[in-house]
Image: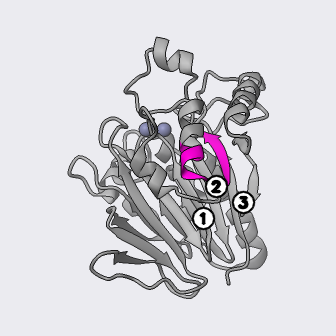
Amino acid sequence: MADGFVVRFRGVRGSYPTPGPTTLRYGGNTACVEIRVGDRLIILDAGTGLVRLGNDLLAQHARDRRPIVATMFFSHTHHDHTQGFPFFRPAYLGSCTLYVFGPRTFGRDLEDALARAMLPPTFPKSLEELPSFRVISNIEDCEVILISPDSQPQIRNVFRDRPEIEPGTVSVRTLHRTFHPSGGVRVFRVECDGKSVVYASDVEGVIGGDTDLIRFASECDLLIHDAQYTTEEYVQGPMQGWGHSTPEMATLVAHRAKVRQLALFHHDPRHDDDQLDAIQAAARERFPNTLAAYEGLAIEL
Ligand SMILES: [Zn+2]
Ligand SMILES: [Zn+2]
């Protein structure tokens, strides 16, 4: 059995960072979630929340001198999910190993999309100049990534390979949702020894709930779901078709998927702490075990 399965929110904001006095409690960094399963470190998205995680990893490395190894997943490559990556200091360490997975979009490999996000003249270093060892792979819905305690992550085709998942192995499955402009996003389900978290950022709800997502998230311990706009903003904005959800859409998926706990995520940068308190309170009327994710929040599954 793996010891411990902890989900820690490093950045909970959508679109762009919002530091300042009105966002102190929920935080202003963009999307990044850290998952620890025993010794394994899994990172979902690389918004600006990744920067402090990188600094914490370096501080730990200075104490124990153990090499930093992380497995990163990108839901998509919009700015608010990649902007922290060039400032992730472990990537500048030769002893650091990064296994990176994400979608191929617009006919471009993930590696190409990441390389284009940090290139002169917009950034002084290019991806290939970073000293860390990196393995960057595209992933598809038919694949599962297996992360066992003692080997590098393996990609298996769920139909062709029919992989047996050993106790203690972390599995990560993906689901492509096409509603987010322009190339859609990947939702992730991270599981180990019967514990599971589903990360559904930048998804937009539909009438009755997104059936494929509901099936994918079925009975997970924690559902992290986009809840960027209030219903009024979504309708009057108009934000329909922008690829984000309302808290009502998130609670509907949580209810129909029978998840244990719901975390509202990808908060709109215009929503201050008081508004997020109100959004959380209203969502609890519909799905009681709901919280609005805040920076620093750690949930042990
Ligand atoms: Zn986003
Ligand atoms: Zn996006």
Indicate which disc residue 56 carries: 3
Return the mark for residue 196: 1
Three-letter code, disc 2: Leu
Distance, label 3 to label 2, CA atoms, is 24 Å
- Region rendered in magenta: 253-265
Q: Which residue lies at the image location 64% right of the left edge and 63% below the top edge?
A: 35
User: Mark 3: few, some, or many residues within 10 Å (few <14, many ≥20)?
Assistant: some
Structure colour scheme: one colour
Mark 3 residue CB less than 8 A from any atom of ligand 1? no
Type of amino acid at the residue the image marks with label 3: Asp
Was residue 43 drawn as part of the magenta stretch in this picture? no
Taking depth in this image into account, of 121 and 298 the one nearest to the observer is 298
Local secondary structure at mark 3: helix
For the C terminus, the quadrant is: bottom right
According to the image, label 2 marks what residue?
222
SS label for mark 1: strand
